[in-house]
Amino acid sequence: MLKEVMGVIYTGENDALLRELTMMRAIAALPVAGRYRVIDFLMSALVNGGIRNVGVIMQKNYHSLMDHLGSGKEWDLHGKNDGLYVLPPFLTRENIGVYSGLLDALRSNTNYLSRSKQEYVVLCNSTMICNPKIDEFVHYHIETGADITLMYTKEASMKRDGAGTYIAVDENNMVTDLEVEPVHPSYDNSCVEIMILKREYLRSLVDKGVAHGLHSLTRDVILPLIQNKGARINAWEYTGPAWRLDSVQSYFKFNMDVLDRDVRKRLFPENLPVYTKVRDEMPARYADNATVINTLVADGCIIEGTVENSVLFRGVRIAPDAHVKNCIIMQDGQVHSGAYIENCILDKQAVIKRNARLIGPGAYPIVIAKNVVI
């Protein structure tokens, strides 16, 4: 067990690019793949790696995330020693619950970092979905004696113009250059925004950074360290599947990718289970005349119509003669009889009334906000 390592998950800024999906929730709380939330993958990876002290730094709109995490029981993080620490933002007249960057977030939670006894910190951002072997990552960092180790992937779909962090790595796995949100990335190595370093070293970097009015840990602190050779910064390659959730299209693509059995096998290997909050439901019920093709169906669904290439969350109801194609329907959504929907994302409790037709373009799905009736 990695008793000398703690985990910190920063739940990031509220991303306007995800529009209605993140209007009332953090990206970390976004429902994905039928029964999970985005944060489940990171939480599970940390726990599978033997980490027993995990702090989650919240921003505004954090209530659904707090409700989902609860006491940390589902991840076995509710013991007497260490466990799950939910760290809501400190609200003041100046601070409206949004940190200017990771440095500000860590500075506001200095007490948590000081109080923790572990020697190392695995620091994660929550806009990624991946399932790495954290214990191997930690052992590699300790063996190489690096000051900081960054996790990266060569997954081509992670590259974005104007978004993400990219690194150049030499033959000794040392980071020689780093680009933050370049217009056109020069390197194929995309950071999955997970790093490890000593807790006291992190505290000193945060104090220096904030004292100089800096906000971004990667751009303002780590990049100068690389350029000035002020620290030994290594890289560790993650070879599993990875997705960056930074737009409605990327969210839609991830859920559609998970319909592929091979992708599911790689994302959910038997030795790295992904845990989530349990909701006790009846099994899904299929009527005699229901047709279901290549679809993820969660507990509690009642299907009487036709569903193909879709992801249905818990408690979804598809009425007779309704047709659902290439859609994501979140918890307790309803599609009434005679309705036809294609390339749509329905947030929780959305209702599509009788005989309605909604067809979005494949490249730009229609998003129906929570509790909306159409």
Image: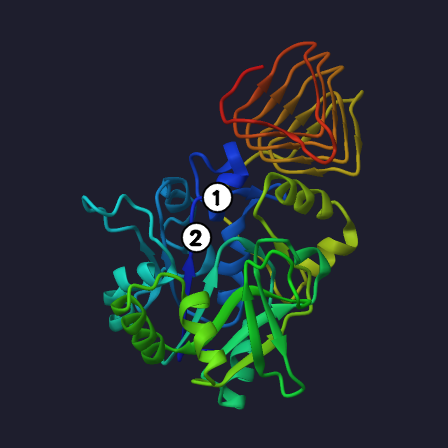
Sort mark 1 into few (<14), some (14-19) or many (20+) by Cα contacts within 10 Å: some
Residue 280 seen in the figure: no
Res 179 → quadrant: bottom right
Residue 298 x, y percent position in the rendering: 63, 38
Q: Is 121 drawn above or below residue 285 in the view shown?
A: below
Residue 256 x, y percent position in the rendering: 72, 42
Residue 143 x, y percent position in the rendering: 53, 89
As drawn, the label of residue 15 is: 1
- Element on which disc 2 rests: loop
For the residues marked 1 and 2, what is the alpha-carbon distance in whole angstroms? 8 Å
Q: Is 14 drawn above or below residue 227 in the view shown?
A: above
As drawn, the label of residue 38 is: none
Res 356 → quadrant: top right
Give the residue type at disc 2.
Gly
- Relative side of 346 to 338, left or right: left
Task: Name the residue carrying label 2.
Answer: 12
Quadrant of image for the C terminus: top right
Name of the residue lying farthest toward the top: 355
Tell me the colour scheme of the image.
Answer: rainbow
Q: Is 315 drawn above or below residue 52 in the view shown?
A: above
How many marks the image carries: the answer is: 2
Residue 251 x, y percent position in the rendering: 62, 43
Residue appearing at x 40%, y 55% in the figure:
72
- Relative side of 104 to 65, left or right: left
- Evaluate if marks 1 and 2 touch, with contact meaning CB atoms under 8 Å apart: yes
Give the residue type at disc 1.
Asp
Residue placed most toward the observer, 223 or 235: 223
